[in-house]
Image (cartoon, rainbow, N blue to C red):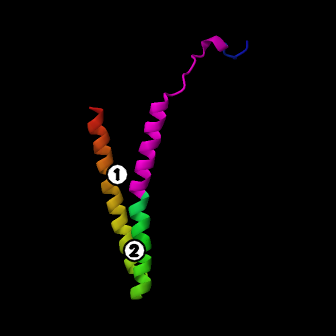
Amino acid sequence: MSSLQNDSDKKPTTPPDTSTVVLLLGTIGDTTWRMFVPTIGLTVLGLLADKQFHSTPWIMVLGIILGTILAVILVRRQIKEVQKNDK
């Protein structure tokens, strides 16, 4: 006996709606900037400040910590907004 499945058993799948794809890509883009801009931005500012004040690596570390905290806050706000709109 063969364990091959009959092609008629498979259900046809429909491609996602264009508006769904656009919404998904928009959400991904929005989440990406909320995560990376604060973290990378404050890290770079910390590097520049460390060079200016000769305090390597302390201001950069502070920038990483503050950027991460800010990114978490921004993403949480986004999640709450999406959950509010789903209701």
Q: Is residue 79 placed above or below 3 in the rendered structure?
A: below
Q: Is residue 25 placed above or below 65 in the rendered structure?
A: above
Inter-mark Cα distance, 1 to 2: 21 Å
Q: Is residue 77 placed above or below 36 in the rendered structure?
A: above
Q: Quadrant of the C terminus?
A: top left
Q: Circle 1 is placed at which residue position?
A: 75
- What residue span does the magenta drawing correspond to? 7-35
Closer to viewer: mark 1 or mark 2: 1
Task: Locate residue 10: give its quadrant.
Answer: top right
| Residue 83: image location, x then y, percent | 29, 38
- SS label for mark 2: helix
| Residue 81: image location, x then y, percent | 29, 43
| Residue 52: image location, x then y, percent | 41, 86
Q: Main secondary structure of the magenta part?
A: helix
Amino acid, disc 2: Val
Tag 1 near tag 2, CB within 8 Å: no
Q: Residue furthest right?
A: 1
Q: Is residue 73 magenta?
A: no
Amino acid, disc 1: Val
Q: Circle 2 is placed at which residue position?
A: 61
Nearer-the-camera pick, 10 or 32: 32
For the point 73% across and 14% down, the residue is 2
